[in-house]
Structures are given as structure tokens and as C-alpha cells.
């Protein structure tokens, strides 16, 4: 399984040149960044600023282990909802039901943009109900997303159900989205990428999404510039729960800055 997942990533074409297996480079030195923040996890980066692109990894074994995508699933889920017609555009308003939830940003009317920014679960639960399991399974297969299994016996299938994806697969999916190469309308892919913007300057755009299952968290996305895109997927344990959540971005940002892919703070 591990070899197959890396083959999928390494076989993808970048500017007409396929990545060779020897381009997957282990980066044990990144362990210093994990140690600095007292964290255990994996980080996969594909750097397309060079030709051929370079695939870099910390903890290769964990990088191919599948986990629930949690809120990183909002990236493909938004594409599913747009394609299914359960949401028309970024301006459609979803009325808050008045139920007080633990995150203040959830306790208000939402649009796609705010739902992505605040990771508003109830909006996407509504999408899941309207799309249904059968159609979700078809979308997952079409997008080749993780194990493509939306079944669940309790809770949301992207957190508590059977859907699983690895860090390697997250990067492969994001690279397809970056190129508008997923089997969805180009305008929908462009909208989702716009919703993912976290930081923008005249030189770089950072697009990303966090995720948290409870015992582990994600930060996935990419930085794009005139030099090319640098994709990343971090999966990290969160034994101290909320206290550990800032470490997701801190580790990735530290590594990207060390590579010159992100401006220094």
C-alpha cells in the first residue's frame, strides 16, 4: 500500500516531466521542527519550483498511513456540493438554526466563504444529507480521494466514519485541484481555491485548510508564486487537544520558510 501511494504521487506529471522514484527524498532534518514544538507527525512536500519537481517527506511510513480527513474534507466537499446543486455560489446564505455551538464563528448565518474560514460543521452536515451516501461515494471515486468510502455508523463520515486519506494522497489531490484537473467544472475548482486563500502578498499566495479529528490534526495546501507551487500536507498527533492545534501551522510554516517558500515573519 505504501509503495502504491507514493507511486501515485511520483507518477503525476509536472510540466510534462514525470517524477522519478529517486526524487522522493527523506528529510530527517525536519524532525528538528517537530521537536521544537513537541510534536509527532509526518509532513509531505512537493516543490514544483524546480524541474523536475521534488517530493520531500518526513516520516515516510506515516505519510502513507490513512487517517480521517476531518475538516480538510471541506475542500472536496465544497466541490461535491456545487456540482450537486445544493449550493449555488459563494453568495448563498445558510441561515443559522439558533443552536449555540462551542465555536462563536459557527453561531451566525453562513456563506461558503465563512463556512470555510470558520470550518462551520453544520453547513457541511447539511450538504452531506442533501448529497446522500450513494452520490458522495461516486464523487469520491471520481476524485480518487483516499479510500473513497463515505459509509458511517455514527457521526460524520469524514470524521467519525470510514473515509480515510494519507498525507501523500492529500498532496496528489491538491496538485490536481491546482491544475483544475479534477472531474468538476473549472469555475467550481477556481471558486474552491479562492475560498482556501489564507494569506496573499504581491509575491505569494498561501491556500490551505486545517483539520482536526481530536487525536490528530491536519494542515494541507500550497504556496504559489511566479517560481511555481509548493504543496504540503501535515498530519500530527494532538494529545493535548486544543493546546496542540497551533503546532499544525507552526511546523509547516517553519519548514516552508527554511526552504524559502514562505516569507519570514
Image (cartoon, rainbow, N blue to C red):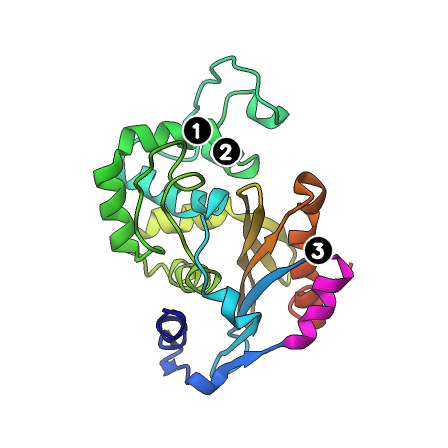
Question: In x, y percent, where is residue 34?
Answer: 70, 63
Give the position of the C terminus as an image quadrant: bottom right
Q: Name the mark nearer the viewer: 3 or 2.
A: 3
Please say if the residues under marks 3 and 1 sit with CB atoms less than 8 Å apart.
no
Q: Is residue 58 visible?
A: yes
Secondary structure at badge 3 equals: helix
Secondary structure at badge 1 equals: helix
Dividing the picture into quarters, in which one does residue 58 lie?
bottom right
- Distance Cα–Cα, label 3 vs label 1: 28 Å
The magenta region covers: 28-38
Question: In x, y percent, where is residue 143?
Answer: 30, 55
Residue in the image at 57% along x and 16% along y? 100
- Distance Cα–Cα, label 1 vs label 2: 7 Å
Residue in the image at 39% along x and 58% along y? 177
**Residue placed under numbered mark 3 in the picture:** 250
Mark with earlier residue (3, 1): 1
**Residue placed under numbered mark 2 in the picture:** 115
Q: Name the residue nearer the viewer: 224 or 74.
A: 74
Mark with earlier residue (3, 2): 2
Please say if the residues under marks 1 and 2 sit with CB atoms less than 8 Å apart.
yes
Query: In this rendering, is residue 91 above or below 171?
Result: above
Answer few, some or many: residues within 10 Å of disc 3's Cα (few below 14, many 20 plus, some between 14 and 19): some
Residue in the image at 49% along x and 83% along y? 23
Is 36 magenta? The answer is yes
Answer few, some or many: residues within 10 Å of disc 2's Cα (few below 14, many 20 plus, some between 14 and 19): many
Q: Is residue 263 visible?
A: no
Answer few, some or many: residues within 10 Å of disc 1's Cα (few below 14, many 20 plus, some between 14 and 19): some
Question: In x, y percent, where is residue 14?
Answer: 40, 76
Mark with earlier residue (1, 2): 2
Amino acid at each position: 500500500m505504501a509503495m502504491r501511494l507514493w507511486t501515485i504521487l511520483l507518477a503525476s506529471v509536472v510540466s510534462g516531466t514525470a517524477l522519478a522514484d529517486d526524487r522522493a527524498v527523506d528529510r530527517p532534518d525536519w524532525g528538528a521542527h517537530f521537536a521544537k514544538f513537541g510534536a509527532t507527525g509526518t509532513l509531505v512536500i512537493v516543490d514544483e519550483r524546480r524541474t523536475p519537481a521534488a517530493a520531500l517527506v518526513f516520516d515516510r511510513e506515516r505519510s502513507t498511513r490513512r487517517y480521517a480527513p476531518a475538516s480538510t474534507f471541506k475542500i472536496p466537499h465544497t466541490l461535491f456540493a456545487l456540482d450537486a446543486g445544493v449550493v449555488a455560489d459563494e453568495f448563498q446564505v445558510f441561515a443559522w438554526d439558533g443552536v449555540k455551538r462551542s465555536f462563536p464563528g459557527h453561531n451566525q448565518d453562513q456563506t461558503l466563504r465563512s463556512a470555510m474560514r470558520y470550518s462551520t460543521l453544520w453547513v457541511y452536515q447539511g450538504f452531506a444529507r442533501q448529497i446522500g451516501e450513494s452520490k458522495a461515494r461516486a464523487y469520491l471515486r471520481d476524485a480518487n480521494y483516499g479510500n473513497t468510502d463515505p459509509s458511517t455508523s455514527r457521526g460524520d463520515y469524514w470524521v467519525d466514519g470510514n473515509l480515510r486519506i494519507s498525507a501523500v494522497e492529500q498532496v496528489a489531490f491538491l496538485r490536481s485541484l491546482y491544475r483544475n484537473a479534477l472531474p468538476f467544472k473549472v469555475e467550481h475548482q477556481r471558486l474552491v481555491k479562492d475560498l482556501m486563500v489564507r494569506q496573499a502578498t504581491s509575491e505569494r499566495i498561501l491556500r490551505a485548510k486545517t483539520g482536526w479529528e481530536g487525536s490528530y490534526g491536519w494542515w494541507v495546501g500550497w504556496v504559489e508564486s511566479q517560481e511555481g507551487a509548493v504543496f504540503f500536507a501535515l498530519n500530527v498527533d494532538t494529545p493535548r487537544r486544543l493546546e496542540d492545534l497551533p503546532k499544525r501551522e507552526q511546523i509547516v510554516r517553519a519548514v516552508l520558510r527554511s526552504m524559502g517558500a514562505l516569507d519570514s515573519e
